[in-house]
Amino acid sequence: MLFGGPHVSPIPEDVMRAYPTIDFVICKEGEVPALELCRQLTAEVPQFDQVPNLVYRQGDQSEAILASPVLPNPKDLGPMPFPKREFAYRHNETIVELRRESAPPVAFFVSSRGCPKRCSFCSIITLSPRWRFRQVEDLMAEIRAEYDREPFGHIGFLDPNF
């Protein structure tokens, strides 16, 4: 079982000790680590120490919990590939317009990561302590590509600070 995200990233070893069924935790941003973890899981001899940002158990049902080196978050979000939504993603139809009987589909996008503030109660800074944003042209290209694939009526932004 694999866990990740802002709730487990600050305390991965504690979570793994409390829940022995968790095999892996990816800390911080996970696009590159998740891809490398998949590569290692399909390798003849997996080398989990080669997966950045990974906390893992040494051997089956082991008490030994190890951590690989942590990669810095990418400074530029531009080279990040667009999500592959065509596999299972369907636009969410939760926004209801009072003028219409049916709700138009909503497509969700992320235009930035992190936060420029340092609130002590917030978990965002554990994943992305530096606020980074996408260029408008890059974001618009993703929106156009998704609309061409499957038209939608609304856009929802999933940014912590939009």
Image: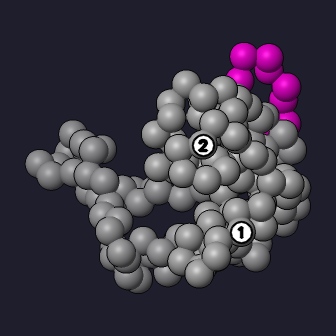
Residue 19 seen in the figure: yes
Residue on which disc 2 sits: 62
Q: Nearer the viewer, residue 33 or 135?
A: 33
Task: Specify the quadrant that holds the C terminus.
Answer: top right
Please state the horizontal and vertical placement of residue 3, each as a whole percent of the image: 54, 45
**Label 1 neighbourhood size at 10 Å, few (<14), some (14-19), many (20+)?**
few
Q: Which residues are magenta?
A: 113-122
Circles 1, 2 touching at the beta carbon (< 8 Å): no
Residue on which disc 1 sits: 47
Amino acid beneath label 1 = Gln
- Report the Cα–Cα distance between label 1 and label 2: 16 Å
Residue in view at x 76 percent, y 53 percent: 53
Residue 128, quarter of picture: top right
Local secondary structure at mark 2: loop
Please state the horizontal and vertical placement of residue 22, each as a whole percent of the image: 51, 42
Q: Residue furthest top?
A: 121
